[in-house]
Image (tube, grey):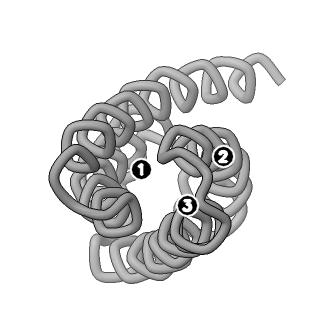
């Protein structure tokens, strides 16, 4: 149980850094492109950081990249779809400010990611 607490702390640290990176890029990019495109671009940058951080720090996985990277990519594609759908629905269709879908993405994605990373992507690491 102690290891799970430490892993969750590392997940939070990597996730907060990736989320901050996402939010900073999304805000920056949304000043000269649509909130939807800005969100997807920012998500891609944060995803690379996230994979490396979670593989090496959170789960300390020695698993093969050939197994874990495709799983992470599947998770990322799902996350990108969510990061596209939220701004598309909330900003483009419902005319809410870009801040609304950015915050929604920042809250939902970390919870979703931990469950999938722990139970599928890096499951052999613990």
Q: Residues within 10 Å of mark 3 (few under 14, many from 20)?
A: many
N-terminal of the pair, mark 3 or mark 1, is 1
Q: Indicate the position of residue 49 as horizontal and vertical percent values.
A: 26, 45
Camera-side residue of 123 and 115: 115
Q: Which residue is under mark 3?
A: 91
Q: Which residue is under mark 2?
A: 104
Q: Residues within 10 Å of mark 1 (few under 14, many from 20)?
A: some
Q: Image quadrant for the N terminus?
A: top right
Q: Which residue is under mark 1?
A: 61
Q: Is residue 24 left or right of residue 95?
A: left
Q: Indicate the position of residue 76 as horizontal and vertical percent values.
A: 44, 70
Residue 67 seen in the figure: yes
Given the current orientation, which residue lies at the most extreme front position? Answer: 95
Q: CA distance from mark 1 to mark 2?
A: 29 Å
Q: Is residue 91 above or below residue 68?
A: above
Helix, strand or loop at disc 2? Answer: helix
N-terminal of the pair, mark 1 or mark 2, is 1
Q: Is residue 71 above or below residue 45?
A: below
Given the current orientation, which residue lies at the most extreme right position? Answer: 1
N-terminal of the pair, mark 2 or mark 3, is 3
Which marked residue is nearer to the observer: mark 1 or mark 2?
2
Camera-side residue of 86 and 80: 86
Q: Is residue 100 above or below residue 79?
A: above
Residue 123 seen in the figure: no
Which marked residue is nearer to the observer: mark 2 or mark 3?
3
Helix, strand or loop at disc 1? Answer: loop
Q: Is residue 116 left or right of residue 124?
A: right
Identity of the residue drawn at 20% across and 48% down = 29
């Amino acid at each position: 149980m102690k290891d799970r607490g430490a892993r969750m702390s590392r997940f939070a640290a990597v996730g907060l850094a990736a989320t901050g990176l996402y939010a900073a890029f999304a805000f920056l990019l949304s000043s000269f492109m649509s909130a939807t495109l800005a969100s997807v671009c920012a998500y891609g940058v944060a995803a690379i950081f996230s994979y490396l951080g979670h593989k090496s720090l959170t789960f300390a996985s020695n698993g093969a990249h050939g197994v874990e990277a495709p799983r992470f990519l599947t998770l990322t594609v799902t996350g990108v779809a969510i990061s596209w759908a939220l701004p598309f629905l909330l900003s483009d269709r419902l005319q809410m400010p870009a801040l609304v879908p950015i915050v929604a993405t920042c809250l939902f994605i970390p919870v979703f990611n931990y469950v999938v990373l722990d139970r599928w992507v890096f499951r052999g690491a613990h």
